[in-house]
Amino acid sequence: MSIAAWICLLAPLGGALAITLLGELVPRRIAGLVATGSVAVAFAAAVVLFVTVLGRDGEERQELTTAWNWLSVGDLDVGLSLLVDPLSIMMALIVAGVGSLIVAYSIGYMAADDEERRFFAYMALFVFSMLLLVLAGNFLILLAGWGLVGLSSYLLIGFHHERPSAIAAAKKAFIMNAVGDATMALAFFLLVYETGTLDFVTAFERVDGLSSTVVNLVALGLLGGAVAKSAQIPLHTWLPDAMEGPTPVSALIHAATMVTAGVYLIVRAHPLFEAAPSVQDLAAGLGAVTIVVAGLIALVQTDIKRVIAYSTMSQIGYMFLAAGIGAYANGMFHLMTHAFFKALLFLAAGVVIHALVGEQDMRKMGGLRRLMPRTWIAMLIGGLALVGLPPLSGFFSKDSILASALATGDTYGYVLFAAGLFGALLTGIYTFRMLFIVFTGEPSGFVREHLHTEHGEGPRWMTAPVAVLAALAVVGGAVQIAGIWHPLADFLDSIVAADRESLALVEPTVTQDWVTSILAVGAGLLGIGVAWLIYGARRVAAPRMVALRNPLERKLYFDELYQTVFYYPAVGIARGWTRFVEGPLIGGSISGVAGATRGLGRGVGQAQTGFLRTYALAIAAGLAVLAMVFVSVR
Amino acid sequence: MGNVIVWIVWLAALFGCIGSGVAVVSMTNPFYSAIALIGNLGSLAVFFLLLQAEFVAAAQVLVYAGAVMVMFLFVIAYLGGQADAPWAGGSSWQRWAAVIAASALLLEIIMVIGLKAGGRLSDEAEVREAFGSPGDIGRLFLTDHLLAFEITSIVLLVAAIGGVVLGAHSRQSEPRYEGPAGVPVSRERSLPPESVAATPHDASGAGVPG
Amino acid sequence: MNGPDVTWYLAVAGVLFATGALGVLLRRSPLIVLLSLEIMLNGANLALIAFARQQGDLDGQIFALAVMAVAASEVVVGLGLIVAMARRRLVLDVDELTTLRG
């Protein structure tokens, strides 16, 4: 099993290295095939791992494989180790599976770009980094994967580096992630100090012995990292800007995988979070806030990709909510289905963008339903899954989360439930707003001019993965149907310790399940109805509501807030230091030394009068002094 | 009786010595200074004789007064009017400092021999008759101080070569003509074009214009 | 040997030395400077001979002879320099030779 794990991890890295080293020696298409192939190999290895693990039970299902002892300092030993257990296998399957589909899609999408090879190298690097993150056996390797993922994201967002907006967006993403990285690092320091280890297994065993302050701090630090990586409020401002990257990047990194790393972290470190219940509640609360806020902002977006981006933010909020209340399996379930339908949405949107030669503004689109019927169907499926209508996958996963919120039984849980419901309503509105604007009505002038569908809606490399994802979005929910069968939960349960029955902290009753589903579906349908009224049938004009609209269009002024609080003071301090410290002190001291030396030289040079007699006088005087010394010392 | 004569001779030599010394330093005309120096050397030779350094006294008169001073006089004669010697000039603080330094030196010497050395300097050693004779000196030069002897001869050789080089009449370093600006130009510097025509004149020129 | 003590000779030597020093420091003509230098050397010679007599050791006289030889060499070179200076029509004034200034 360990060999499969290493193959799974290293295949994409090998692909990235191969593409980098071969460079322009191979045709561009080959680079894409190498990348896709390497990720597909990783997927195959993950499948092997999955099958192997299925054949075992309980404790046997987790295996730690260490390549070598990487860091040995005092009592701390950190090895280069991979942990293969149901949770990591599930993540690996998602990452490698969806990843290979998206990389295949990119072969068609990026065919026109001159720097295609660089793109595929970066994509393969990203998959490797993400796999490193999910397969890590201790916090340090996880941090390494975390950082590499951030790097790949930066490289891919800024892929079109001739665009200043892309570069700025890449920097923004990286810096915000760095904030999270910092809190995580602090948490790790504390963890090492208190428990003396970074291994998952060992650290979690020692959690009981820690004081509550320590556990809270560690959990808080981890939460900070998760919030940054998953673009939850308040560290969310980078995600919409990250849409500057090519669409496959948005699909892979900012929908299916990287942004879910935060959720994975919370689920992986759940013993820590369970020992710090207030932090866990905070996580759930942040998730709920993000669900609502992101949903609201999505209502006024005009860029098709940004709508989907805010939708991603909102859906991850659901996952945070689930992790925060202890419904880990449900959260992971939603993570999986979300990967399917969100990637589907992004890729289908990519087909539209590709057909419209790069245009992303929805207001210029319209009436594409008849011109691109297959894409329309795909996006419709994705949209319905997102809103959570049965029998599509999103229904099962989202409702299970809401039911768990209801099942917690306390007021806080009810508040979370209400937020989730409201989020479902908003999801319906903004998703179908997008769909109606883009696909219904009459084709706009822009569309008539630029749309080229003579060769089908898109190259086959692009349409095939979309079809696969659409199929997954439909049937993916079958893995866990509330109340009837839950193989996924059982699968993940096997990672818990012996004294616990199941992984989840809450277990909704059948009644709660039904109530939730009815309410959630109702909210979704209501949202779709509202969207149809305003944007579909155009019976009702979109409400102006300037007072609400302006803040939403300005994304609730988060960017301005951060600029004022962080950027301006930092720049001011830097300028102040340059003017008052670096200039006078450092530069001044150096030039002062130079000036002093010069002055000293000039002063001493006064002795070189050039007069012979002065020199002779100096000799005589020196002689007199010496004689005096000799006489007195005797 | 012999003592009185010694003292008288000593005093005479003293005056001659000090007087000529002051004269050397203070005369304006270098010719007179050179003559005064010869007087000084003579007085010193008397002192040497009183100190039983006969050979040195003879050498002093022969070499110093005879050869070195003659050389001095030759040069002064050669330089002629150019040798007019300005008296002390320069900044006054230098003058005072010079006086102070010289006085300090003198004072220290007096102090040492008067106070510090105490009575030790008064003990004279007993010397034989042949003390200071050429024979003794010659023996020492060829046995104990052979190295000093040889090195001194090398120094003299080097000085002789130096003197020849310095006085060499080479054409390269001679200012023969005046360049365009009226400044004497020597050949080794870059020639202005118009003076190239003057070159043949160089080749035929013999003596220094002076 | 009767007559003044060695101390007196040493005092004379000191006076000679100081006088010569004054001459070197105060005069501007290089010729006079060379002559004053000779005065100083003679003062030193006198001191050497006096000490030789006092110690009964001939080494002092040998040293004095060596000094004389070196003084002669130095005079040769010095006079050569002065002649060279005169040939180049330089002013024979040590205060004018300030190329070493700086």
Image: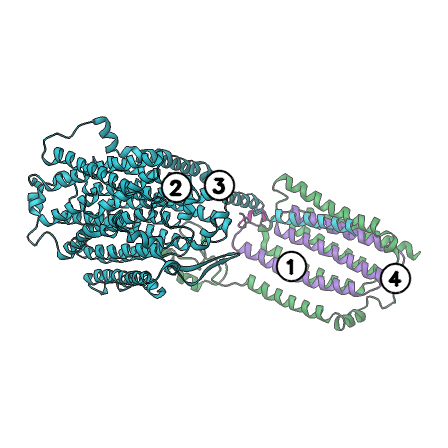
Chain colours: A cyan, B green, C purple
User: Residues at badges 3 and 2 in contact (C-beta under 8 Å)?
Assistant: no
Which mark, by number, is residue B125? 4
Circle 2: element type? helix
Using the image, determine if residue A8 lies above or below residue A541.
below
Please state the chain letter of the residue tagged with numbered disc 2 in the rendered image. A
Q: Which amino acid type corresponds to the residue marked 1 in the rendered image? A: Val
Q: Which amino acid type corresponds to the residue marked 2 in the rendered image? A: Gln
Marks 3 and 4, how far apart at CA: 100 Å
User: Residues at badges 4 and 1 in contact (C-beta under 8 Å)?
Assistant: no
Circle 1: element type? helix
Instruction: Characterize the local packing of mark 2: few (<14), some (14-19) or many (20 or more) Cα atoms within 10 angstroms.
Output: many
* Left or right, C93 with reference to A246: right
**For mark 1, what is the residue?**
C75
**For mark 2, what is the residue?**
A280
Work out whether mark 3 precedes mark 2 in sequence or the reverse, and give the earlier one. 3
Q: Are marks 3 and 2 on the same chain?
A: yes
Magenta extent: C92-102
Which mark, by number, is residue A213? 3
Name the image quarter holding residue A511. Answer: top left
Which marked residue is nearer to the observer: mark 4 or mark 2? 2
Please state the chain letter of the residue tagged with numbered disc 1 in the rendered image. C
